[in-house]
Every structure is written in C-alpha cells, then in structure tokens.
C-alpha cells in the first residue's frame, strides 16, 4: 500500500492510532531542505506500507514543502518503483514455494 494522502497521511495515522508507529508530523516550511528530503525518505515505513509525497514529511517530521511540487512527483515515482520491486520479489518467492 502507498500512502500518498498528503498532509493527512491517513494510512500512517491509522497505524499510529493502533500504537504501531510514532508519527512526528511535519516541521515548519523549508522548501530548499524539504524537496530533497521527501524524495530521499520515500519508502516503506511499516511492512507493506510505503509513503510518498507529503505523507513522507508527516511520517518523518520533515519540513513542509511550500509552493514547489517537483518532489511530490519524484516521490510518487520512487514509491511506484519500490512497489514494483517488492511485487517482483513476492512473485519470485511464490515461484520457489
């Protein structure tokens, strides 16, 4: 599953409600820092749950992104690539069983 629900980080927050994750929430806006950080931290935060876009900032306490959106697109692409890799791994595992 990919949580790309933005500031709400809905799936991440559900895990927090159940005591499975601690979510710091976003830090104040700092465009220069947030763009790269969001893309770098895109990935799995819990087995089977990845974060993309502003959900990454929520999950890791990164700065808000502000008026630029390039990182959200790159983050989404990275999350999709990670998801495909995981699906391929599962396919290989299923074949060996």
Image: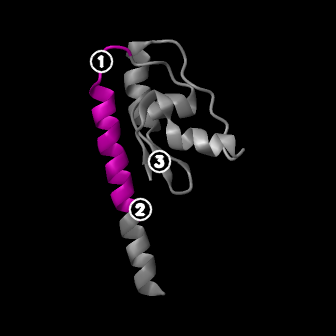
Which of marks 1 and 3 precedes in the sequence?
3
Which of 18/79 is in front?
A: 18
The secondary element bearing badge 1 is classed as loop
**Disc 1 marks which residue?**
68
Which of 15/30 is in front?
A: 15
The secondary element bearing badge 3 is classed as strand
Q: Position of 46 compared to 88: left or right?
A: right
Query: Which colour assignment does the render follow?
Result: one colour
The residue carrying pointer 2 sits among few (fewer than 14), some (14 to 19) or many (20 or more) residues within 10 Å by Cα, namely few
> Which residue shows up at 39% across the image and 33% down it?
53
In the image, residue 46 above or below residue 88: above
In the image, the segment drawn in magenta is 66-86
How far apart are labels 2 and 3 at the CA level?
11 Å
Where residue 86 sits: x, y (%)?
41, 62
Asked if the residue at tag 3 contacts the one at tag 2, i.e. Cβ–Cβ closer than 8 Å, the answer is no
User: Which picture quadrant has residue 59?
Assistant: top right
Q: Which mark is residue 50?
A: 3
């Amino acid at each position: 599953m990919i949580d790309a629900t933005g500031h709400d980080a809905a799936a991440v927050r559900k895990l927090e409600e159940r005591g499975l994750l601690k979510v710091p929430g976003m830090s104040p806006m700092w465009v220069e820092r947030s763009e790269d950080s969001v893309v770098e931290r895109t990935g799995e935060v819990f087995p089977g749950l990845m974060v993309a876009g502003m959900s990454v900032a929520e999950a890791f306490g990164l700065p808000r992104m502000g008026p630029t959106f390039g990182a959200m697109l790159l983050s989404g692409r990275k999350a999709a690539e990670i998801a495909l890799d995981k699906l391929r791994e599962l396919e290989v595992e299923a074949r060996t069983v």
